[in-house]
Amino acid sequence: MEKDKKQQHLLEKEFTATFLRELMPGILHNFANPLNGIMGRSKLLERRIDMLNKKLSEQHPDAAGALLEEIQKIKNDIRSVNSESESFFGMFRDVSTKFYALAAKEEERISLSQMLAAEMRFADFYLDFKHEIVKKLDFDKEVPDFKGHAAELSLSFWCLIRFAMAAALKSEKKEFSLTTGHDDENVFVLMKHSGEESGTLDANRIESISAALEILEKYSARVEFDRENGISTVTIRIPCR
């Protein structure tokens, strides 16, 4: 039995090693094609039903009047399909943005506000975080960008956000806030959460946080931790000039 578990673990590691860079791009591509088709066809169907209704009203006004309620129901259903399609496309875009960022190899210009806004949309796929935590988000749209590796920064901030989420979920208030901003020299991130930090740190998480902080050090980031009145605060400043 123990040998079987080791073999399974080995195969799981082999699978996950190929998942991000080899498998996920194909998954996203294969989802994108039918999704774009659904959205295009539903928009076309909406235009066609409007044209049909107009033509029917001009040529057969009595019939158009008799069918008015049914036509309106069809139009409402089509609008619902369009709305749900756009909602699904938004979620698909959030997932694809995250995985494309993780697969990025070259340096690029990074807007910290855009990156963290995408991270927070992706975080809503953690259902406990989406439904149980009171979130307050404030992103500075004018933050200057800087050059860096999107993959390592995305993973670093994901690690810190996950740590804050875990602490907030165990707290009574279940509060989380994230703010970005800038001054003449730096872009900064201010992350606050309720909950005790002790008890959320096992050996693996300590190692993960250490790795996240080491990556931020590459960007000469200054990271400060504080706690007051049951609220923990992480402040990150990254030089951008």
Image (spheres, helix red, strand yellow):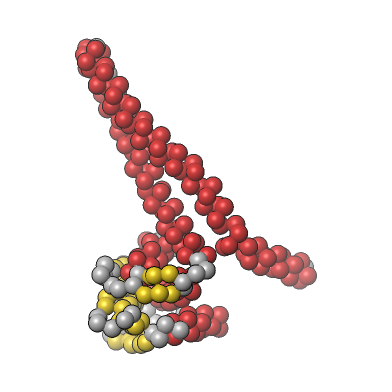
Q: Nearer the viewer, residue 49 or 124?
A: 49
Residue 43, image x and y in percent? Answer: 35, 35
**Residue pictured at 41% horizontal, 34% vertical:** 41
As displayed, is residue 182 above or below residue 64? below
Which quadrant: the N terminus?
bottom right
How many numbered marks appear?
Answer: 0
Q: Is residue 199 left or right of residue 177?
A: right
Which quadrant: the C terminus?
bottom left
**Residue pictured at 35% horizontal, 39% vertical:** 82
- Within the image, what quadrant is residue 180 found in? bottom left
Q: Nearer the viewer, residue 58 or 172?
A: 58
As displayed, is residue 32 above or below residue 71? below
Residue 92, image x and y in percent? Answer: 44, 52
- Within the image, what quadrant is residue 146 found in? bottom left
Residue 212, image x and y in percent? Answer: 47, 80
Residue 77 visible somewhere in the drawing: no
Residue 144 visible somewhere in the drawing: yes
**Residue pictured at 37% horizontal, 48% vertical:** 87
Residue 113, image x and y in percent? Answer: 32, 69
As displayed, is residue 144 above or below residue 229? above
Q: Nearer the viewer, residue 184 or 37?
A: 184
Q: Is residue 118 left or right of residue 52?
A: right
**Residue pictured at 37% horizontal, 79% vertical:** 195
